[in-house]
């Protein structure tokens, strides 16, 4: 258990702005004493008492409810007092100032959650889930964050760490007792276990990737030649005039034209007019950026014109190695073809019209199927890019451990397994550095 914080922090825990109720939260050893100065005798833990909140000169700042939690049975694991006042930003600020006058310190971003983590109330993945739940932009994202908060992700991470520990014990024993008659490192069961571990890591990466998409929204790139109807499609999806539709083909060299969010999903418009090889340095940079967008996209919507055009051929060429492409044959109101969808070897093709909205339902159904956003009832949990990144490192270390084992090199395998263990530990914060914690909590808001 880390040493408890010696200072007491205070912050407004409710959102900025006016509201019916506003909460000032105190956490730390002096929380009860400070609250007593402001509001008089405290009620027993986990009960409330009506109180007047007084300024230093005895004047009434506000009145409301007092709620106390005694360490360690609180969110932070410390003594916590909540002053539930009216949701007046001015009165709440005065209450905070009064608490600071009595020795509390204004809390930094995420400091309540950080204390909860340091006191062992939540692990790091769960602490992040609190922030993800608060920031959730869809029901699916909120449910997933709730599952992570309940430990769905952490339990999987712990299970992996345990398998890894068992494997390390085996390998280290083989190194420490080389004179044993049995060659432990050559045991087929050891290799089978390593393979199973690799499969488990891969499965968790896939689930964490999905969890990250739920938190961050999908990164969808709409690609196509100028005038294919990208902006019109965006407008049709948004249901309002969000992007600017023009009849004049774009001449800009800045290919990544627009970044915006739509219902919790990040969208980028990419004009593929310039996805051609070029000697021009500026244009080449544009091409590089457009390619990078396409490569990191969760989904590419490739907008083709009704007619087969040179631009369409160029687009197909540009997207040849890009996974998860939906081919959209736009402007069917001009071509006269019926709306519909057809699976082909290069992916799903959809015939539609951004202008009339015909066929859009096929597009929406497919997006929901790909993302799983339409159905989060199957145990999806929230995750972050840093989790996926740590899991990928763990995966790489387990893979090299496996190859060292196949060569009979126990020492190197043991070292790789140790590194994999450290990477897994970063998920829940069992292995954590100040730099990692600083990065995680800096993204939180104050009062959390
Ligand atoms: P972008 O350059 O790819 O973003 O293309 P725009 O969305 O600006 O559209 C170019 C032109 O095609 C505009 O005149 C649009 O009104 C028109 N357009 C886009 N989609 C359709 C469609 O489904 N049917 C018809 N008839 N015209 C469309």
Image (tube, rainbow, N blue to C red):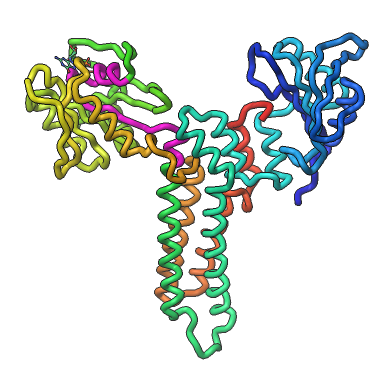
Q: Residue at x 52, y 59 (%)?
A: 160
Q: Quadrant of the C terminus?
A: top right
**Above or below, 339 relative to 171:** above
Q: Residue at x 31, y 38 (%)?
A: 369
The location of residue 38, given as percent across then percent down, is 88, 20
Give the residues in magenta.
Answer: 211-237
The location of residue 99, given as percent across then percent down, is 83, 22
The location of residue 137, given as percent across then percent down, is 48, 27
Q: Is residue 231 magenta?
A: yes
| Pick the front one: 379 or 445 | 379
Q: Is residue 252 left or right of residue 95?
A: left
Kindly indicate the quadrant of the structure image that contains residue 177. Answer: bottom right
**Above or below, 104 relative to 117:** above
Q: Is residue 236 magenta?
A: yes
The location of residue 286, given as percent across then percent down, is 29, 27
**Quadrant hosting ligand 1:** top left
Q: Determine if residue 274 is in view.
A: no
């Amino acid at each position: 258990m880390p040493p408890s914080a010696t200072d007491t922090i205070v912050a407004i825990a409710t959102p900025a702005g006016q509201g019916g109720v506003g909460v000032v939260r105190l956490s730390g050893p002096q929380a009860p004493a400070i609250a007593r100065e402001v509001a008089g005798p405290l009620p027993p833990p986990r009960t409330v008492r009506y109180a007047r909140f007084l300024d230093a000169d005895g004047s009434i700042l506000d009145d409301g409810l007092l709620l106390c939690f005694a360490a360690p049975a609180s969110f932070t694991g410390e003594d916590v007092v909540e002053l539930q006042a009216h949701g007046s930003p001015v009165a709440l600020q005065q209450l905070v100032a009064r608490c600071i006058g009595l020795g509390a310190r204004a809390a930094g971003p995420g400091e309540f959650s950080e204390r909860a983590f340091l006191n062992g109330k939540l692990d790091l993945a769960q602490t992040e889930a609190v922030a993800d739940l608060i920031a959730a932009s869809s029901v699916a994202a909120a449910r997933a964050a709730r599952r992570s908060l309940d430990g769905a992700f952490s339990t999987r991470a712990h299970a992996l760490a345990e398998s890894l520990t068992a494997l390390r014990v085996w390998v280290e024993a083989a190194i420490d007792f080389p004179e044993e008659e049995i060659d432990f490192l050559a045991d087929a069961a050891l290799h089978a276990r390593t393979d199973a571990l690799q499969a488990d890591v891969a499965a968790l990466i896939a689930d964490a990737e999905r969890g990250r998409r739920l938190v961050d929204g999908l990164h969808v790139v709409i690609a196509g030649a100028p005038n294919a109807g990208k902006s019109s499609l965006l407008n049709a999806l948004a249901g309002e005039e969000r992007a600017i539709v023009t009849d004049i083909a774009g001449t800009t060299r800045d290919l990544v034209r627009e970044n915006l969010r739509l219902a919790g999903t990040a969208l980028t418009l990419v004009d593929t007019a310039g996805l051609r090889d070029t000697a021009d340095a500026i244009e080449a940079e544009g091409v590089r950026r457009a390619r990078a967008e396409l490569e990191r996209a969760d989904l590419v919507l490739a907008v083709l014109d009704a007619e087969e055009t040179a631009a369409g051929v160029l687009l197909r060429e540009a997207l040849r190695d890009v996974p998860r492409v939906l081919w959209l044959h736009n402007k069917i109101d001009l071509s006269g073809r019926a709306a519909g969808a057809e699976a082909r070897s290069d992916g799903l093709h959809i015939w539609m019209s951004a202008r009339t909205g015909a066929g859009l339902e096929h597009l929406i159904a497919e997006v929901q199927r790909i993302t799983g956003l339409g159905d989060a009832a199957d145990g999806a949990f929230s995750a972050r890019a840093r989790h996926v990144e740590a899991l990928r490192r763990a995966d790489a270390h387990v893979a090299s451990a496996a190859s060292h084992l196949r060569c009979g090199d126990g020492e190197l395998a043991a070292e790789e397994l140790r590194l994999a263990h450290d990477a897994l530990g970063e998920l829940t914060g069992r292995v954590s550095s100040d730099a990692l914690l600083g990065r995680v909590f800096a993204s939180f808001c104050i009062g959390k």
